[in-house]
Image: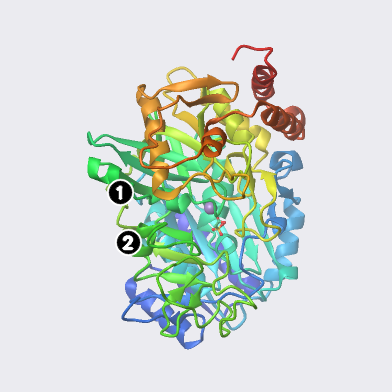
């Protein structure tokens, strides 16, 4: 046996000694294995079978009502030195963290099965992919990991060949919020998660590995692990530009990744291809361009708001072979959520009680679907290409009701890094805590960067070097509101108008106006045909409120200063340059 498999076996033995499971099951990822697991979960009530004629091979899982979102306050990055985790992470010394969480793991799998899940993040034959092994006592986690990763025998073979893997140990424990931790040990390539069965806390390949641990690996190895969707925009000439876009959780990454062009664009021959909806791993290739893969194999998308109008590709994807978590049910056991808009009505809410709108919504606001990417009609064949796709543009965005215009382009890479570093967004139901509060969420990585943000920004800046053919950087805001509190931009399919301008900028033909915050579309450069935007909308979507931006840049100064001397001085210098443009003392 290879030494890697030896090491894996020893780790499984050690974990089994600590957790004392009744059985150990090595997952091979086969259909037969999945069928047996699903049958077992149906029998014990973990899964409820949905209407087989409308939603074949699909299931509903209801989680514990207090276990419905990521728990950022219980998520730790445990580096030997606190400074390496940075003010952006909760930190605990590794020895203390291991001791605390191992005490919870002690005997926690008694009477249960311990599953060993070898998985590969990214196409199995891509040099950009990385592997891991998750140990869990949750068959629901196994079923989800099977959809979200390349899991089983092929991953194990790659692990054996490569000689390295990320170790993830998970137990649902008692689902007691008082006995819950999500801990990361980047130096040890190790994750330990106890007390939650929810997505980002329990499917360890996703946020824990593919972002927190991978961001750390990426810094060491010269690449980027980002909270970004990846899509391809094909123009009527048949040229495809790939765009990576970072938005915080539950801000529409899945909708943008699966966008269907408005009718006029469709008729003209525009197409949008989906590569990924949540995570992007990218690195400079030999030609100096960034090449990106989606490390995931499925979508763990937010259900509420998904409809035939807002995201027909997602809706088509979830017609079969889908695991739903915390959605409501119709009387004939079809899944239902707020905004599904399909003419049906809910009978049972996400807690399994008769639906009463006075008590709670039918679906939890962070209810989700888990489905294979292969089921998505717009899934790009290029998503499986081991070389990845070349990235033309990087887009940052958040939920900003005020101030931030529809789109602007950064002047250059350093300015773009500042734009990403100073991103703000209103919080959503994807994490526990207050919703709708503006917070800084640099590059949408606030909950996911596995090391000090100051070092992370320096790592981003380091890609600007001789020979690099860097993507252009943009910022978008689909969520600008008018004085009446209503959204000013139609969003969804019409966002293609903005993407068209973005790739026009990359190709060098779309016109822009220079402003202190960056390049905005020149009047008439962004196609608004067929939309009726009033004067207020035009002003707010395409204008720069200098007073407001001055205040924003003062706030950004305070935010960057919180990181102390580790913050790369280029960022503060860039901020000052923008600030002086705003007060009119610098060049424009
Ligand atoms: O729960 S996940 O972290 O997987 C989804 C999200 O919040 O982005
Ligand atoms: Mn996400």
Residue 382 in view here: no
Q: In this rendering, is residue 276 above or below 1?
A: above
- Tell me the residue that label 1 is attached to: 380
| Relative side of 339 to 494, left or right | right
**Residue 375, numbered label:** 2
Please identify the quarter of the rendering in which residue 353 is found.
bottom right
Residue at left 33%, top 47%? 262
In front of the other: 385 or 51: 51
Q: As displayed, is residue 65 above or below residue 101?
A: below
- The quarter in which the C terminus is drawn is top right
Q: Residue 550 placed where, x, y %?
A: 70, 27
Q: Is residue 543 visible?
A: yes
Q: Quadrant of residue 360?
A: bottom right
Query: Do the CB atoms of the residues marked 2 and 1 lie less than 8 Å apart?
Result: no
In-front residue for pair 88/220:
88
The x and y percentages for residue 281 are 46, 42
Where in the image, quadrant-wise, is ligand 1 located? bottom right
Image location (x, y in percent) of residue 206? 51, 55
Q: Which residue lies furthest to the bottom in this view?
A: 43
Q: Quadrant of the N terminus?
A: bottom left
- C-alpha separation, residue under disc 2 versus residue under disc 1: 11 Å
Left or right: residue 262 versus residue 434 is left
Secondary structure beneath disc 1? Answer: loop
Residue found at x 35% / y 52% = 124
Disc on the earlier residue, 2 or 1 = 2
Residue 250's spot in the image, x, y percent? 55, 55
Secondary structure type for disc 2:
helix
Marking on residue 367? none
């Amino acid at each position: 046996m290879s030494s890697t498999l030896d090491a894996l076996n020893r780790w499984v033995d050690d974990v089994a000694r600590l957790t004392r499971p009744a059985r150990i099951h090595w997952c091979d990822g086969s259909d037969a294995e999945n069928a047996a697991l699903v049958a077992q979960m149906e029998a014990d009530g973990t899964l409820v079978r949905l209407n087989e004629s409308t939603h074949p091979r699909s299931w509903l899982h209801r989680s514990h009502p207090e276990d419905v979102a990521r728990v950022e306050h219980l998520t730790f990055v445990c580096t030997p030195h606190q400074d390496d985790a940075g003010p952006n992470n909760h930190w605990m010394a590794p020895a203390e963290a291991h001791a605390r969480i191992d005490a919870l793991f002690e005997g926690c799998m008694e009477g249960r099965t311990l599953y060993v899940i070898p998985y590969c993040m990214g196409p199995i034959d891509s040099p950009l992919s990385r592997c891991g092994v998750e140990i869990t006592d949750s068959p629901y986690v196994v079923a989800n990991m099977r959809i979200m990763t390349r899991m089983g025998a092929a991953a194990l073979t790659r692990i054996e060949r490569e000689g390295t893997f990320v170790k993830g140990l998970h137990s649902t424990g008692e689902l007691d919020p008082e006995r819950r931790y999500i801990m990361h040990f980047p130096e040890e390539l190790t994750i330990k998660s106890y007390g939650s069965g929810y997505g980002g806390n329990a499917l360890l390949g996703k946020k824990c590995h593919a972002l927190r641990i991978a961001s750390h690996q990426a810094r060491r190895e010269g690449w980027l692990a980002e909270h970004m969707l990846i899509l391809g925009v094909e123009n009527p000439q048949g040229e495809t530009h790939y765009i990576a876009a970072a938005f915080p959780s539950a801000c529409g990454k899945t909708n943008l990744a699966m966008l269907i062009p408005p009718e006029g664009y469709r008729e003209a021959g525009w197409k949008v291809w989906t590569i990924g909806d949540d995570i992007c791993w990218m690195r400079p290739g030999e030609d100096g361009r960034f090449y990106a893969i989606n490390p995931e194999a499925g979508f763990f998308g937010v259900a509420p708001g998904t409809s035939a109008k807002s995201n027909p590709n997602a809706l088509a994807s979830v017609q079969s072979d889908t695991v739903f978590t915390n959605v409501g049910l119709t009387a004939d056991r079809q899944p239902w959520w707020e905004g599904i808009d399909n003419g049906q009505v809910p009978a049972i809410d996400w807690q399994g009680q008769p639906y009463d709108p006075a008590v709670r919504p039918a679906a939890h606001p962070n209810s989700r679907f888990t489905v294979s990417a292969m089921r998505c009609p717009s899934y790009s064949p290029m998503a499986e290409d081991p070389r990845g796709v070349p990235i033309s543009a990087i887009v940052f965005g958040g939920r900003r009701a005020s101030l931030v215009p529809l789109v602007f382009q950064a002047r250059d890479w350093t300015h773009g890094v500042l734009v990403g570093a100073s991103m703000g967004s209103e919080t959503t139901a994807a994490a526990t805590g207050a919703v709708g509060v503006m917070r800084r969420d640099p590059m949408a990585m606030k909950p996911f960067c596995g090391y000090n943000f100051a070092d992370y920004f320096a790592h981003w800046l380091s890609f600007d070097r001789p020979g690099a053919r860097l993507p252009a950087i943009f910022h978008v805001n689909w969520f600008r509101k008018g004085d009446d509190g209503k959204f000013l931009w139609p969003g969804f399919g019409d966002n293609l108008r903005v993407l068209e301008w973005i790739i026009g900028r990359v190709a060098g033909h779309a016109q822009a106006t220079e402003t202190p915050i960056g390049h905005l579309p020149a009047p008439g450069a962004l196609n608004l045909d067929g939309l009726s935007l009033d004067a207020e909308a035009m002003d707010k979507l395409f204008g720069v409120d200098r007073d407001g931006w001055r205040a924003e840049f003062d706030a950004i100064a305070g935010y960057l200063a919180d990181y102390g001397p580790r913050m790369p001085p280029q960022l503060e210098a860039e901020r000052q340059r923008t600030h002086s443009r705003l007060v009119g003392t610098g060049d424009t």
